[in-house]
Image (tube, rainbow, N blue to C red):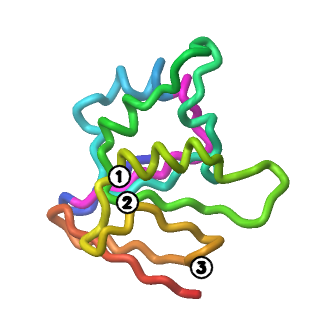
Amino acid sequence: MHINHDGSRLILTGDTNAVAWKDYIMPESKTKIKSEVILGSHHGSITFFDDPRDEKYHYTTHLKTIAPQITILSVGKNSHGHPDKKALEYYEKYSSGSNKGNKIFRTDKDGNMEIILKGKGSWSINKNQ
């Protein structure tokens, strides 16, 4: 889901994976997919980048195109290893950072958060621990 409020954008990725982005979402919306804030897919799972058809490379074109300032990861204690270490590296690498330099916010470390889209590419984040 792509939310656009007066020029400030937020993408809610849900549980989408690399194949969905590569085969369906990117070809359909390449020019409209930029966003200041992205909610990382599936609690920071590597499936957002891992296309099982390509064993050599992870897919990162979608995140490079989205070019978020920050990534939000909704994650808590789990037995699945979320967030994935390599996925965290990609979110860190391809998020440009807030005005304080923060690139990744995680609910397991930062608590509950409220994202406020202010328009014209501006946003703020309130942490409600």
**Residue at screen point 30% across, 50% down:** 35
Which of 103 and 72 lies nearest the eye of the viewer?
A: 103
The answer to whether residue 35 is left or right of residue 80 is left
Q: Which residue is mark 3?
A: 111
- Marks counted in the figure total 3
The foreground one among 49 and 26 is 49
Nearer to me, 68 or 91: 91
| Contact? badges 3 and 2 (CB < 8 Å) | no
Q: Which badge, 3 or 2, comes first in the chain's sequence?
A: 2
The quadrant of the rendering that contains the C terminus is bottom right
Of the numbered discs 2 and 1, the one sitting upstream in the chain is 2
Q: Residue furthest right?
A: 79
**Cβ atoms under marks 1 and 3 closer than 8 Å:** no
Question: x, y percentage for residue 34?
Answer: 27, 44
Q: Which residue is mark 2?
A: 70
Residue 104 located within the stretch drawn in magenta: no
Residue at mark 1: 95
34 above or below 17? Answer: below
Instruction: Tell me which amino acid carries mark 2.
Output: Ile
Furthest residue to the left? Answer: 120
CA gap between label 1 and label 3 equals 20 Å
Q: Position of residue 18 (x, y in %)?
A: 54, 28
Q: Please give the range of residues in magenta.
A: 8-20
